[in-house]
Image (tube, helix red, strand yellow):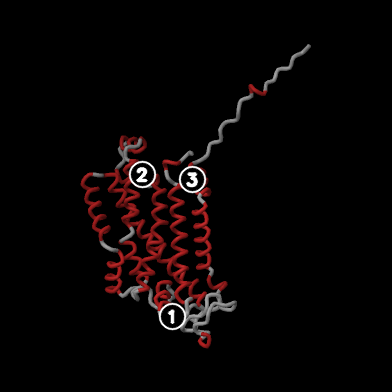
Amino acid sequence: MTTEIDTSALAVPPAHTQHSPAYFAWRRFAANKAAVTGGGVLAIIILAAIFAPLFTKSAPDAQLYLTQSLAFPSAEFWFGVDDLGRDFFTRIVYGARVSLLIGFAAATCSLLIGIPIGAIAGYFGGRVDWFIMRIIEIFSVVPPLLAAMLLGALAGGGFVTIIVVASLFGWFGVCLLVRAQVKSFREKEFVRAAQALGASPWYILRRHVIPNSLSPIIVGFVLSVPGAMMLEASLSFLGIGVAPPTPSWGQMINVGINFMFFYWHMAVFPTAALAITVLATTLFGDGLRDALDPTLKGR
């Protein structure tokens, strides 16, 4: 009688599939429903701002509906008509261009300032780090809005002024993130190996440390955007931001307050647009920060 031997138990299990850190980061981000929702809303707003001429009925400064001024929202005018006979939905959509452009431009400038300063402070430490931290403390105690009002009044407002002011008060957040990351990398084996081979500090920072600090850089960039947008809206609300007739949400809120008790749509829609955009960007940035947290990689 021949006895058959079950060899299934002796089979070698398949090797564990190796995944990159980006895979685990994506899984953590996808599991964060708030971040995914915020990213989706932000993407819709960005696409609407880019392709605004395709689905708006007029130019943002065209006074085509003077006979219907201050008309309430309807099927014809989704967000109503403003006091100068302009389609309010069109102005809201084009206002997104201003807010997003200033937000992303200011965030980019903040990166260009904060990354090198944070890398230098974290790598060299000592007196260099002490000096940079004192500068950051000075910027931290100055109220950004008051300084922005002063500089905006002196320079006459406008796109460039707002971007410069937002960058001046946004760079140190990125700087602190990069500084902390660089300090943690300073004692790593790959940095010590580069030092042993005679690489200069600037080469090590440029080729090894900063590329490995992309996570806080990306997070710092995204989280700098809503701050710049709020600053632009505040300055435009006070009349020293983007000059009319260029549509700006802060500017529209300023005008809408005068009609708030009778024509609610004049203030509610630009306020809601600003709040939703800032909230979506913040949720997206928080989700990126959690997903790219090095302490969670591989889980």
Which of these two is toward me, 145 or 18? 145
Q: Under tag 1, what secondary structure?
A: loop
Are the residues at dot 1 and dot 2 in contact (C-beta closer than 8 Å)? no
Q: Is residue 199 left or right of residue 76?
A: left
**What element does badge 3 sit on?**
helix
On the image, the x and y values in percent for residue 124 come to 26, 44
Residue 40 vs 9, above or below: the answer is below
Q: Earlier in the sequence, mark 3 or mark 2?
A: 3
Residue 179 in the image, given as x and y percentages of width and height:
32, 48
Q: Earlier in the sequence, mark 3 or mark 1?
A: 3
Kind of residue at disc 2: Val
Per the image, the residue denoted by label 1 is: 259
| Residue at mark 2 | 209
Q: Is residue 299 above or below residue 279?
A: above
* Disc nearer the start of the sequence (1/2): 2
- What's under tag 1, amino acid-wise? Phe
Is residue 169 placed above or below 189 in the rendered structure?
Answer: below
* Quarter of the figure with the N terminus: top right
Residue in the picture at 32% in, 36% down: 192
Which residue shows up at 32% across the image and 40% down it? 186
- Which of pointers 3 and 2 indicates the residue nearer the eye? 3
Q: Could you say where residue 193 lies in the image, as x and y percent from the top left?
A: 34, 35
Near mark 1 (Cα within 10 A), the count class, few <14, some 14-19 or many ≥20, is: some
Question: Which tag is nearer the camera, tag 3 or tag 1?
Answer: 1
Residue placed at 53% from the left, 36% from the top?
18
Q: Which mark is residue 39?
A: none
Specify the label residue 25 is tagged with: 3
Depth check: give the residue in front, 252 or 26.
Answer: 252
